[in-house]
Image (cartoon, coloured by chain):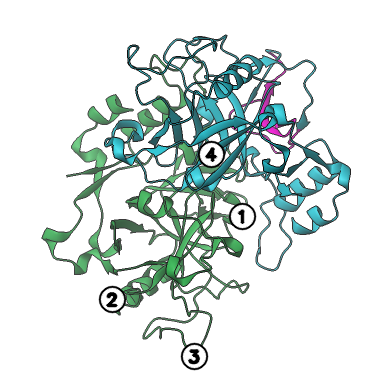
Chain colours: A cyan, B green
């Protein structure tokens, strides 16, 4: 993989759009999230609104369920009297669990998938699609970020966010709005103590990790932004990277796998 | 899933054989590992020998690579003069990466797999097999434990162990001896700070987490053993559990996945 990345051309890399990039600032450092505006534009808008109202500042990480998700939001979110006001953000949003596949760039992975007719990558995100239904959706791979909701499909609003910290829970696909991906700082969310309550919620409020702030990168002075580039997923270099991981040729591997699953394909980022 | 487990009969559960059960004692608690003696009998024997020599006591967790593995062993293991002696344990072992599928119980998963012709469960472990080659092997799902090795296939001996803490790295299948599975205490290994060195090794020895001791359950007084039962994987109850996860029927899910991948199938344990 290192050889493939070293041979990459400058055009194989893309920068993050500051308006679609979020910084989740935790006591131990910054988590960088890229919003998937092609899949969940209404959620992305609402999350930007919440972030710009400083809604998340001082809230907390509430839940860490082993091999599943880390979740953050308002500890009092379920109490309508105590909950932090959403301000100008919407209380409910259209579901955005899937979208029409028409018009969506898609680099198909040849290796197949247990969950969807076709899987691949769209704009840097792992995704799936179904030519029969004409729909496409994001896949719940490690590091993907979603918007928590109640039982009603339209009850999510982006005020409660989670990130996948274990084996891909693909059963969530098409059931929830997946809004982006952590492109840097995953270890700050994956290495937290697991919660001992039901679903991994922290039972003792003192265990919750405070959120210092959440910001849209566009609102942060340029000098304080994370200078990141991501490998484009619509390039020959990315195809070469997939092949290098499908059949590893180094001295350690004796039997190349010959195939790869969607969520095992790395989506490289580099500092510039 | 809860309903399926509540309807389970006593015979649907099995106890762990004390001779095939290891306790990895860490400052924050006990990790329970079941050895996969049907797949890696030589490694299981060698690990038992090492454990009974108290080889692991006072060694440390050396490596935590995000979305990959946590690894423990001798910090001086690569220095033949400083390394802790292996005593009566063997320095090298036959590879045990695969074994003949003949004679092996196998509960096949109907949903297919990206990596192997057939996948399923054998004696409580996630496994794969290939009727053409006549071979079977364990699958690198979350919580599976393997024996580190150098480039030579027969260079492993069980003195360096790792556990999968992220999305299943199935490319390791058939490339390394998979020796067991963590059946309790995974969160003690998955929530550790990630190492900042290459491959997630801790750069500062002070970051290493000490191993208090490692024991074979058979050597521990009965009153101090972990009383655990595991759901058998060759039962109608287990099939019902797979179906309950393949097509979730609760109020939250709007679109049942209709399928499940090998490493998403839960392998329930309960305290007795």
- Location of residue A6 in the rendering, given as x and y in whole percent from the top left corner: 82, 56
Q: Which mark is residue B122?
A: none
Residue plotted at (57% across, 38% down): A143
Q: Is residue A113 magenta?
A: yes
Left or right position of B195 against B248: right
Q: Nearer the viewer, residue A24 or B43?
A: A24
Residue at mark 2: B52
Q: Chain of mark 1?
A: B
- Mark 3 secondary-structure assignment: loop
How packed mark 4 is, by other alpha carbons closer than 10 Å (few <14, some 14-19, many 20 or more), is some
Q: Nearer the viewer, mark 1 or mark 2?
A: 2
Left or right position of A50 against A12: left
Residue at mark 3: B81
Q: Nearer the viewer, residue A147 or B95?
A: A147
How packed mark 1 is, by other alpha carbons closer than 10 Å (few <14, some 14-19, many 20 or more), is few
- Location of residue A175 in the rendering, given as x and y in whole percent from the top left corner: 52, 19
- Location of residue A42 in the rendering, given as x and y in whole percent from the top left corner: 63, 14
Q: Nearer the viewer, mark 2 or mark 4?
A: 4
Q: CA distance from mark 2 to mark 4?
A: 47 Å
């Amino acid at each position: 993989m290192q050889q493939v990345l070293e041979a990459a051309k400058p055009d194989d890399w893309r920068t993050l759009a500051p308006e679609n990039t979020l910084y989740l600032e935790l006591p131990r450092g910054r988590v960088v999230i890229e919003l998937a505006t092609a899949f969940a534009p209404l959620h992305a808008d609402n999350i930007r609104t919440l972030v710009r109202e400083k809604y998340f500042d001082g809230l907390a990480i509430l839940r860490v369920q082993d091999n599943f998700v880390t979740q953050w939001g308002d500890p009092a979110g379920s109490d309508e009297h105590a909950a932090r006001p959403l301000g100008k953000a919407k209380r409910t949003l259209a579901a955005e669990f899937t979208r029409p596949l028409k018009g969506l760039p898609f680099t198909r992975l040849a290796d197949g998938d247990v969950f969807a007719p076709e899987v691949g990558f769209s704009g840097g995100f792992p995704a799936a699609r179904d030519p029969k239904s004409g729909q496409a959706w994001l896949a719940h791979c490690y590091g993907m970020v979603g918007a928590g909701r109640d039982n009603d499909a339209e009850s999510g609003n982006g005020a409660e966010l989670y990130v996948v910290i274990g084996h891909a829970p693909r059963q969530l696909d098409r059931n929830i709005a997946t809004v982006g991906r952590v492109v840097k700082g995953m270890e700050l969310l994956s290495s937290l103590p697991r919660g001992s309550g039901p679903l991994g919620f922290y039972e003792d409020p003192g265990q919750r990790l405070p959120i210092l702030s959440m910001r849209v990168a566009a609102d942060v002075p340029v000098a304080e932004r994370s200078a990141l580039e991501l490998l484009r997923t619509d390039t020959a270099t990315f195809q070469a990277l997939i092949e290098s991981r499908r059949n590893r040729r180094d001295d350690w591997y004796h039997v190349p796998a010959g195939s790869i699953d969607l969520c095992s394909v790395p989506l490289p980022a580099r500092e510039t």
